[in-house]
């Protein structure tokens, strides 16, 4: 059981590492938000659940923390991305489509 | 707001808080249990109005079953898409095709739209930038289609078909 927990935590740590690598490698703010918050979702989730499996007495506590992370994690990433769109941060030049204009027209139309 | 609604929201909130307390203390020790129930009672008394304002639909067995299925689908999508994004990050050439697309939603209530938007954000590869009435602005790391209907089918539909049942007005 302990070994199983260690493995789960290890996988979580790998995802956390990949998330950070993504922040370094990806080209613009929006893609970095993708990496920075997404890989971290599963990373943090698995790490905490793994700790819960290693110490069965903490399992329910760990599960509760994991659920809270799952519920609250989208909000900061959404806030960062929305703020950068509102302040006009451009997309990287590898982007293929940008429907922001269409959305703004829809917004003005009321 | 009717007394019945208030009593119901009070009860749900109370049970929810007790459940959280049990998770946190993970013991059935009598002292712990009683202090937990007391604190939950006080909190539920003070906050049942804000719980009511969330506009959650009344709990039925069908809704609960669909919610469980929805959570399983969400977890499956999160894991699947996490591997996808991880692959894109480690690949030396970074096979990304980022873009911002629009999708539609048929959901009406605010809380349902919030859950849909947060589910889209939780699934790696897509996240919600903005939401207005029935249109959601989504950033997509690997754009497969620019068409609004097809994008809706790929991004939103897998969650929305469960949420539509959960948040349906009158359910039989």
Image (cartoon, coloured by chain):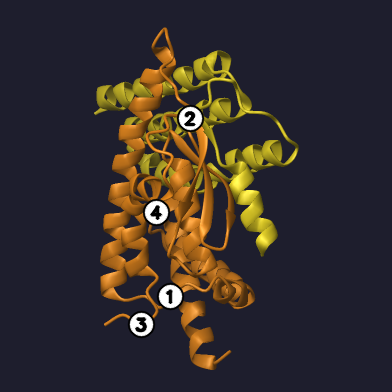
Chain colours: A yellow, B orange
Chain ID of residue with mark 4: B
Q: Marks 3 and 4, how far apart in space?
A: 39 Å
Relative image position of residue B139 (x, y in whole percent): 52, 38
Q: Are marks 1 and 3 in contact (CB under 8 Å)?
A: no
Chain ID of residue with mark 3: B
Q: Which residue is mark 3?
A: B170
Chain ID of residue with mark 2: A
Which of the two marks, 1 or 3, is nearer to us in this view? 3
- Which residue does the image show at 67% across and 38% down from the upper left? A85
Q: Which residue is mark 2?
A: A40
Instruction: Locate the C terminus of chain B by quadrant.
Output: bottom left
Residue A110's image quarter? bottom right
Q: Which residue is mark 4?
A: B27
Q: Earlier in the sequence, mark 4 or mark 1?
A: 4
Q: State whether residue B42 appears in this view.
A: no
Q: Earlier in the sequence, mark 1 or mark 3?
A: 1
* Mark drawn on residue B121: none
Q: Which residue is mark 1?
A: B57
Which of the two marks, 4 or 1, is nearer to us in this view? 1
Q: Are marks 4 and 1 in contact (CB under 8 Å)?
A: no
Q: Secondary structure at mark 2?
A: helix
């Amino acid at each position: 059981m302990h070994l199983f927990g260690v493995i789960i935590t290890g996988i979580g740590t790998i995802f956390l590492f990949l998330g950070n690598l993504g922040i370094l490698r990806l080209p613009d703010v929006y893609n970095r938000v993708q990496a920075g918050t997404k890989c971290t979702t599963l990373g943090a989730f698995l790490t905490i659940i793994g700790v819960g499996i290693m110490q069965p007495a903490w399992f329910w506590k760990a599960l509760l923390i994991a659920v809270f992370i799952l519920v609250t994690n989208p909000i900061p990433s959404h806030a960062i991305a929305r703020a950068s769109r509102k302040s006009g941060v451009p997309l990287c030049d590898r982007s293929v489509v940008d429907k922001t204009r269409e959305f703004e027209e829809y917004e003005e139309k009321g | 707001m009717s007394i019945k609604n208030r009593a119901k929201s009070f009860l749900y909130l109370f049970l929810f808080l007790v459940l959280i307390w049990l998770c946190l203390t993970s013991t059935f020790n009598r002292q712990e249990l009683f202090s937990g129930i007391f604190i939950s009672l006080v909190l539920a008394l003070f906050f049942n109005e804000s719980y009511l304002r969330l506009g959650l639909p009344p709990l039925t067995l069908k809704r609960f079953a669909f919610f469980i299925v929805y959570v399983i689908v969400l977890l499956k999508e999160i894991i699947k898409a996490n591997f996808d994004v991880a692959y894109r990050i480690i690949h030396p050439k970074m096979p990304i095709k980022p873009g911002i697309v629009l999708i539609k939603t048929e959901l009406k209530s605010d809380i349902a739209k919030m859950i849909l938007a947060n589910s889209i954000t939780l699934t790696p590869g897509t996240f919600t930038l903005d939401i207005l009435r029935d249109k959601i602005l989504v950033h997509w790391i690997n754009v497969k289609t620019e068409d609004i209907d097809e994008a809706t089918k790929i991004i939103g539909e897998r969650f929305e078909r469960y949420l539509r049942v959960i948040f349906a007005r009158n359910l039989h």
